[in-house]
Amino acid sequence: MGLMLSCGDDVVTAELAEVCGQASPVRLLELGADELPLANLGAIRKVGDRLYFTVGPRERVDTGGISLPWYGHPATSTVYSTGLCGEDRVEIARDVWSVFSDERTPGLVLGCRGSGANLNAPSSFDLVALDPEGVSAPRLLIPAAGCFGAGWTDYGVVVTESLGEEVERVLLYPYPADLEAAPIDPIVLLEAVSSSHWRIETGADEVLAVNLDDELVRVDLSDGSTSVLEVGVGSFQVSPSGRYVQWFPPSAGEDLAAPVYLLDRETGVTHLLAEAALDRSWGFVRDDYTVLDVVEPEFHQRLVSLRTFSAVDLPPDRRLVARVDEGRWITSSSWFLSPYQLRDLASGAETTLLDADGVNASMGAEALNALLVPFNSPATGELQRIPYDGGPPQVLARRATAGYLELADGRVVSPVDLDADSLGALVLVDPDTLEEQQIDDRVYAPVGHYNQEALFGADVVTYAVSDGARSGVYLARLAPRR
């Protein structure tokens, strides 16, 4: 059946299928008129047979145009838990900003607890265990930085503890054998390391850090033993597999450019990649390439193959954005924003993918999706798919916003015509006909974020409504595409 809405003009309503026993939207969580879910990816999450909702007051921090309006965070948050169809609602925590689970702590529902005023200070967030039934208060597992510390490993959570200006101690909090244990007692891995940016990284069974003698050291988490990998290191990055370490020597005064080296841990050989590159260069593309910001003879990017160590220098007015296939990359002539080009790096030949300046875009395996509105704008505009094979652009929806969701069957779900509160009509569009069918109204913009995990399947959409007594988080199953 379709959802009938009274919106003045005639509205084509979306056909819905049954979910939770009814062929209409199901309210999973009732909200007050001044409440909305947070816009982060984990704000609506399924763990086991329970749903978790992190909500806060409608009033959010003004992002000042740095990001989309709905990314602003509230001063406080509340976490609710319900059954899979909204039954058995309980409040389980306050000032917890993310709810998740991890297979290395089976049976625990975890959360990040801290002050809304410190959301940009990850070191201030405790890791807590939540009671899904809301009977017990959250239990502290790891204090400050426990949630957003250096990393989660096979042996526990690695956290750094400040000892003063640019000096930290590295701690390991082992996963508890007793799920009721709290808090966890840490093990000291390294007494003093440099806390400057890019000075510590974790792998499944190791920690790499720069000590106060500018040595790159490795801690084996299986036995706590340490070894020195390189000397004279200022900062470093590790490739996804852990095989390669790209490193710079300590900075010398105000000169930001320095030699950059690559340690191949499999062969034990260290290679010089460039004589003068910027510390904080872009880094690894999988274990295949590394991208450097080289400053001589003028500022430009260099792509280095980690298999052959051959290098390609880009023109100063091009920046690498994404790899399409062997030899072809998407580049930008506007510091990672559009216009975008499809460039053959070996020959330098390129074609224009997207000529519009500074619009919202996302790169897929075979095509680029471009929302033709200014970057970080809540405006409604046309959504296009631009294939990499040279074919013409396809219009996916005549109207969409940055909170859109592309379904597995190719249809698009998007809020449109957002008001000052980031609320608008939620529409379903078939790209073959471009006909809009309305699912609901007064829907909060970040629908795409709420559905990243496809909690109930690819044909079910979760969204939030702010509309007086109707306010809440809803679930709707879409009828199959015809």
Image: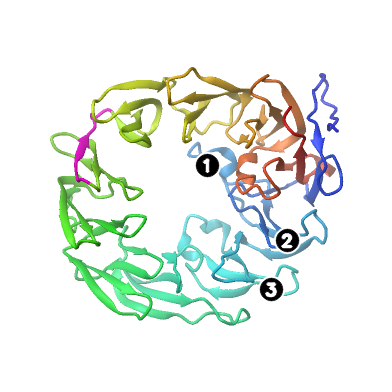
Asked whether 6 falls inside the magenta stretch, the response is no
- Helix, strand or loop at disc 1? loop
1 or 3: mark nearer the eye: 3
- Residue type of the residue flagged with mark 3: Ala
Residue position marked by numbered label 2 in the rendering:
50
With 455 as the anchor, is 183 left or right in this view? left
Position of 200 relative to 451 (above/below): below
Q: Residue at x 36, y 26 (%)?
A: 342
Position of 33 relative to 6 (above/below): below
The one nearer the camera, 201 or 147, is 201
Res 330 quadrant in image: top left
3 or 2: mark nearer the eye: 2
Q: CA distance from mark 2 to mark 1?
A: 32 Å
What stretch of residues is rendered in magenta?
Answer: 308-317
In the rendered structure, which disc, 2 or 1, sits on the residue that comes first in sequence? 2
Image quarter hosting the C terminus: top right
Say the numbered circle drawn on residue 32.
none
The reply to whether residue 39 is in sight is yes
Picture coordinates of residue 236 (x, y %)?
A: 27, 58
Residue position marked by numbered label 1 in the rendering:
63
In the rendered structure, which disc, 1 or 3, sits on the residue that comes first in sequence? 1
Q: Are marks 2 and 1 in contact (CB under 8 Å)?
A: no
